[in-house]
Structure formats: structure tokens, C-alpha cells
Image (cartoon, rainbow, N blue to C red):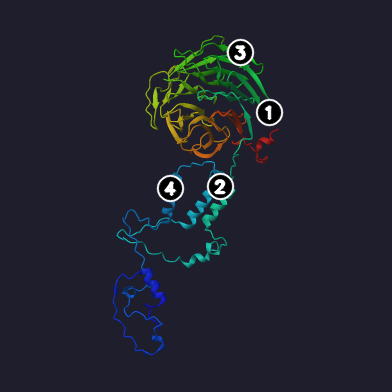
Amino acid sequence: MPSFRHSRFGKRLRDVYGSPEIEELPDRKRRRIDPHSPINSPSRPQKSKVLPKSSARLKNASPFRLKTPPRIEIGDRFVPSRKDNIQASYNLDEEARSCTLDLFPNSVKDRCSTDCANDLYKSVLRSEFTSSPSTPRRIFTYHSPQNSLPESKVRLNDPTDDTYQFSPLHSQTRELVIQSRSRRIREVPRAPYRALAVPDLPDDFYTSLLDWSPGGTLGVGLLSDIYMWRSDTCESTALCMIPDEMDSYSALAWMQTVPIMALGTYDGHLEVYDASTRQLVRRYQNAHNDQNGNNCIGSISWTSNVFSSGSGDRSVKHWDYRDSSAKPFKQSNGHKREVCGVKWNTDGGVHSSLLASGGADTRVCIWDLRGSMRESGSTAGSNSSSSQKHGKVDGGRPLYEFTKHRATVKGLAWDPHNSSILASGGGAQDRCIRIWNTTTGTMLNEVDTLSQVCNLVWSVNSRELVSTHGFSPMTSGNQICIWGYPSMSRVCCLSGHRERVQHVALSPDGDTIVTASSDQSMCFWNILPGKTSVVRSGDSILDYGKLIR
């Protein structure tokens, strides 16, 4: 019988493990063989008398000996080792995945249903396969804790124990799955339900040529013409044409109570039209007149019978269209460069006199036209802003100045659910949306959108903010994003334009937005929740008001 080292298995072991420490074995004495035997014939090759070194026997090692697992040491008595902690490794890996940039926000993982399913799957994994890290109770124990003893058999007397359940999941995990099934997954349409061509829409970031009236009429400015589009009949009519062929419209805004529209031009003129009769009500010649020639009116906003206009002359002027005089009743100067955005707070309460303005000087100014006794002149550049009292506030001095942005601020939106909250968006060099508290003058939150913020609008039926974007060096730009407030977590991002989405308007019912882009297209999106009807409960016999005759 051949020896172990000459067997086929022994050769395989030598090939795998090699021969680290070998000892030469003495040559075996060969058995005498008859010289006339056929085995010793010349035709049969003879084996070598000297054994090769590679065939030596392994010394003091058995290939079948099991290796002892190394003992895991705990480095510190206060900070336990996380080497065998599956939960810590899982959380670290999850954080690493969440820190990566989402370069494809429109992929399958961005859909709401898929996100909810992934969150549920992670929660089930965390509940089933991980447990709370166990820290050694003894202070001077520097090795891993021993395996815990099996649980007592007393728990088997409980009929609700997991041992008697048909489901392979634990009770806590089953409750988690049941709760997730009761949640309604919001499905957001990925494409617009209507798209219209808007030729001659100016490709100018500093314009505002789209607004939706409370009566359901959409106003659009196309160079020298203003058109009205009815959402119920889908018919468009021309409102007016600019008298000067060398001039063109740059801003428009609807009055909130009656069908009155205010228009602004590149040359600094203002016009007020009655949309019902399509007649000119007021015309303010050279309403904004800058010595450097930058008179473009980039934004207009209404509050009651008063509208304000921001222009390239770095001023915000306030007009009462009922006044026949051609002069503003008040002027606000607080920007060092052109004013790009103007937005009134239309809550109808104590904050209805607040006006927000954004400019190319990266500032956001809050104006209080009542001139009430409030602290003013404070500059809020961080979460903790210092306020300095400068006496009585007039319309020519801002109540607050927010200087956190690093680019042009055009997008401004007041929260309809909390009248003291303002959202502002920065340009291509800033790419951030910031939330401000105009009562205390502090910044509440900020989020980096990774793209130029062109415009903002709040949902009136839910705590959500819609932003439109332009150029982006890191992600696919020209998107429409929905953000949940106050967490500012992204709900979804939509793509439907090839160029930056300059304009956005909200429908009167609050469930539809319309966007206009530099690609000469206008899209309608039904992406916001509608109004929820309040269902009254049935009459109760305990309602004594029903018994009064």
C-alpha cells in the first residue's frame, strides 16, 4: 500500500500548503528483485532512487486541524468594540450610501413607491438581524462577552410567543409591516398632462412673465404682446400690445380680488389693464428711471389695491392704482444692485404689511410699510442674528437684511400656512433654498439643491414647497422639485423642459402648477394635493342644540 505522502491526496496537500518545514527522510531499502523478472526489463522505466525534496513529510502540522478563531479584544472599557456589531456596520454602510450624490434623480429609486418599499425593507432588516449593542458590564473585562444563556422555558407558556407564530418575523417587525400597509403612498405624475408652445418667450433670468389669476385666467407675456389663457375653455385671447416697438414686456402680475393686471417693461414703464374690458386703466411713464439706463422692471407683486415693482435702478416703488397721479406713494431703497424679485405677504393678518425683495447683490430684504415700532436694521447671515434697534421703521429702510446667499436671489415665496415664514432661492453660484423666520430674523433651514433656483411657490393644501431650477454642474438640471416642509426632504423631481424653468404659477385650487421655460414651452403639472373635503359626522343624540325649537 503506498504511503500517505506518495498518495494523490498527499500530493494535492503539498501543492496547496507547500512544504514550509521539512525533514529529509532516509532512503528506504529497496526490495531485491530478480534481474530476470519482467518488471526490471529495459522497456520499463525505473524509478529514481532519490526522493525529491518536495515529497518530504510535513512536520508537526496536520492538514485536518481546525484553526482556533482569534479572540476579539475590546479596546476601551467606555467605548465597546464594534467589530462584531452587525448593526453598527449596517448603519455605517447606509450612511455611506446616503452621502453619495444622486446624479440620476429621475431613476426608479426616486419614485415614491420604491422609496417607501426600500425604507420598509431596511427597517425589517434592522429589526430582524440586528440588536442593540451589548456592552460588557464588568469594567475590567477586556474580551468579548460570552454567549448569553438560552432563555427560560417559562416564556413557552405564553400563547402569543413567537415560537407559536406562523410568521417567521418577530412581533415588532410584524407590527411595523402592518403599519406600513395602512399608509397611503402618494403617486406623483412623472409627465405634464398638457404642454403648449409659447414662442417669443424671452430667455431672460431677470423677468417674470407668468401668473395665474384667482379667477382661473393665465397671463403670459411674449415680448410685445400679453395673452390670456382660460383653463376651463382652453382658449387664449390677446390682452394688449406694447405701443413702443423698441420696448417689450418684462413682468406681469394679477390683482388678487378683481381681474386687474399690472405690466412692466424693459424701459421702466408701468401699465395697469382691466382684463374684463381689456382697457388701459393707468400708465406710469418712466416709473423707474436709472441714470445708467438699467430700467428693466423684473418683478411685480400685489397686496389689496397696492402693487410694488422692483427694477434695475436698485429700488422698490409702491403704487396705488386708484391714485391718478403718476408718482409712487412710497419708495424703498436697500439694494446695491438691481432688484430681481418682489413678493407681498398676502395672509391678511398682522404680516400683511411685510414685503420681501431679492436682488443681484445676494440680499433678501424684509420691508414693513406700516412703520411700526419694531427692531430693524439687523443683518441675518446665520442662524443667530444680532438685532439692533434703530428707532421707528419707515418704508425706506428694511426691517431685516438676510445676507446668507452667495448669488442672485430671484425666487421668493411666503408660506400660506405660517405667515412669518419666507423661502428664498439662490442662483447658480449658491444653489440653496433657505427658510427664514421674519418675526425673529433668523434662518430656520437650508438645503443645497445642486442647481440654480429660478422660482419658488408654496402649496396651499399641503406643507410642501415647489422649486424650479436651471443650470446644474452636478446633476441633470432644468427640473421641478417638490420639498417637504419643515424637514426640507425631497419628495420628487420632475423633468419636462430642455432649458431652465424660469417661471412657475399656482392654480387657484392649488393642485396644479404651470411652468414656462426658455425652450419656448409651457407645461401643466397636476402634482400637488387638492383640497380635502371635511366630512361631518352624523347627528348625535347628545347634541342638545338639535332639541331647541
Which residue of the protein is positioned furthest toward the front in this rendering? 42
Q: Quarter holding the N terminus?
A: bottom left
Q: Amino acid at mark 3?
A: Val
- Viewer-side residue, 381 vs 42: 42
Residue 45 percent coordinates (x, y): 39, 80
Q: Amino acid at mark 4?
A: Ala
Q: CA distance from mark 2 to mark 3?
A: 54 Å
User: What type is the residue that disc 1 sits on?
Assistant: Asp
The mark nearer the N terminus, 1 or 2, is: 2
Quadrant containing the C terminus in the rendered view: top right
Residue at the disc numbered 3? 281
Q: Find residue 96 and name its label.
A: 4
Residue at 48 percent across and 42 percent down: it is 102
Mark 2 residue element:
helix
- What amino acid is at disc 2? Thr
**Residue position marked by numbered label 2 in the rendering:** 114
Whichever of callouts 3 and 1 sits on the residue coming sooner in the sequence is 1
Instruction: Give the Cα distance between marks 1 and 4.
Output: 49 Å
Task: Kindly check if marks 3 and 4 are in contact, taking CB atoms under 8 A apart as contact.
Answer: no
Local crowd size for mark 1, using a 10 Å CA cut-off: few (<14), some (14–19), many (≥20): few
Q: Position of residue 466 (x, y in %)?
A: 54, 33
Q: Quick check: 399 above or below 48?
A: above
Q: Residues within 10 Å of mark 4 (few under 14, many from 20)?
A: few
Residue 153 on image: x %, y %:
48, 67
Instruction: Specify the quadrant of the image occupied by residue 363.
Output: top left
Q: CA distance from mark 1 to mark 2?
A: 35 Å
Q: Residue furthest right?
A: 549
Left or right of 28 on screen, residue 424: right
Residue 346 occupies quadrant = top right
Q: Is residue 274 visible?
A: no
Residue indicated by mark 1: 232
